[in-house]
Image: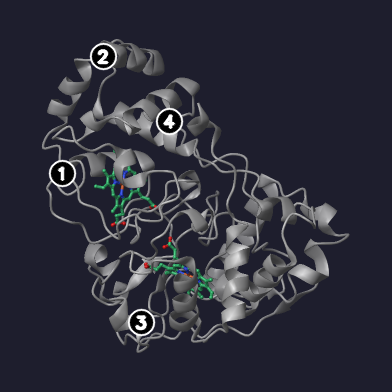
Amino acid sequence: MQITPRSELQLTSFFKSAPLTLSARTHSTIYSSVINSSLANSSASSRSTIKPSRITMTLICSVVLFSYGIHARAAAFDYFQALPEQPLIPDDNPLTRDKISLGKKLFFDKRLSVNNRLSCNNCHGFSARDNAPAVTTGASGKPGKRNPPTLLNIGLQTVLYWDGRSSRLEDQAIDHLMDPDIMGNKTGKALIERLSGDKQYVQLFMQAFDSAHAIKMQNIAKALASFQRALMTPNSPFDRFIKGDGKAISKKARHGMQLFNDTGCLACHFGVNFAGPAPGPALGMGDGFYELFPNNLGSSYDKSHRLTNDIGRFEYTKNTGDKYLWRVPPLRNIALTAPYFHNGSAKTLHEAVTIMAKTQTNKTLSKNDIDAIVEFLKTLTGDTPAVLKN
Ligand code: HEC
Ligand code: HEC
């Protein structure tokens, strides 16, 4: 495999206050010709064995490269990576069948919200969301300002929320349960009492946590997290393609995949979830990957799509350098999760790709190129997770 150093994307900050020293802002190498040279032909067989150990090794390399800003010719990092078989599973919450099925029941249960009106599924439904609202309204009745991300493959994410302000699904669940603008519970006690009144829950919690008094906030969170970790979507055409089935995606999608590289999308959207670094020993949970959005300020989209109204990660860290920094979001199943961006301002995938090209790479793509990239992005739709089928 030929790896040549690519000319670096100009991720220059137009926001004077934002330093360029953050973690993995710019990247070293990308395959010169990802599609034609290797993936679709003979060397595909060697890639069909992407194993966790390899991902781990390459991650270590990439982290080293990123930290020191070295442009290495490392035969190191596979920017395009197949979906791993396992999500990230923390030691203190091993994945069990009982916790997954309890978590599923909780996820669809409106009693989780203070007014018994909202389940997690109300905002994070799994079917294609063509007419979904840009932002959601929680228990407080006050419309929020952000779009609910898809939870498919969320178990691969090292940073949670658009601004990365949470790092563990367990903590995130408690955060949401108590958030007045989401589930609105004022105390955990009332929620625990509601659930304890249901004999089936008493039984299911006991079974999942091996304890008679298991209905606790911590365990509610652990069960919800376990269910979400089971939301992996294997077997996408893209995965089949990079594992060696050259026919799994169309010629147009292959062209789009090449453009995704050549345009510079891959510099930010790479790795197992197209969201930058994947979890592994070299990256702790919560180590993140953030980028400016818009990276090139001044396009007409700033206004038309209100791209600078929300200051992003700054709101949480209060570091001036974090203004307009956003987590690089995953792109798997992106064809199912309209509308797009933190404020849901892009209604279609075509629109989102057009804006990304302009704001992030300062390129105006032709309609054909956008079509091809969208065709490629559609190949990232995997199988419905088994846990949702029954
Ligand atoms: C009222 C709508 C609403 C409900 C109900 C809701 N969420 Fe969310 N959720 C959101 C929004 C909006 C965000 C993004 C917030 C942000 O990034 O600032 C989010 C973010 C998340 C994230 C982070 C996703 C990512 O890609 O980082 C997870 C995980 C999550 N929610 C799980 C849940 C669970 C579990 C429940 C049920 C306990 C739930 N949500 C209920 C609206 C909702
Ligand atoms: C400099 C880094 C960077 C580059 C380059 C980049 N993106 Fe993004 N992308 C982001 C960030 C950050 C966001 C989140 C924007 C937000 O917070 O609303 C995003 C969001 C997206 C979304 C919407 C995701 C969602 O769930 O709503 C799509 C689709 C997308 N990018 C595709 C692309 C494509 C296609 C390209 C190449 C034309 C590209 N990106 C180039 C950083 C980048």
Of mark 1 and mark 3, the one earlier in the sequence is 1
The CA span between labels 3 and 2 is: 53 Å
Secondary structure under tag 3 reads helix
Q: Hey, what amino acid is under mark 2?
A: His
Q: Nearer the viewer, mark 3 or mark 2?
A: 3
CA gap, disc 2 and disc 1: 28 Å
Name the residue beneath numbered marker 3.
301
Q: Residue 326 location in percent, x, y? A: 37, 67
Q: Nearer the viewer, residue 213 or 103?
A: 103
Count all numbered tags in the image, as a single digit: 4
Mark 4 / mark 2, whichever is N-terminal: 4
The tag on residue 159 is none
Is the C-beta separation of discs 4 and 2 under 8 Å? no
The residue beneath circle 4 is 93
Q: Earlier in the sequence, mark 3 or mark 4?
A: 4
Gap between marks 4 and 2 measured at Cα? 18 Å
Q: Quadrant of residue 14?
A: bottom left
Identify which amino acid the numbered label 1 is placed on: Ala
* SS under mark 1: loop
Among numbered discs 1 and 4, the one appearing first in the sequence: 4
Q: Which residue is mark 2?
A: 213
Q: From mark 3 to mark 4, how far is it between C-alphas?
A: 43 Å
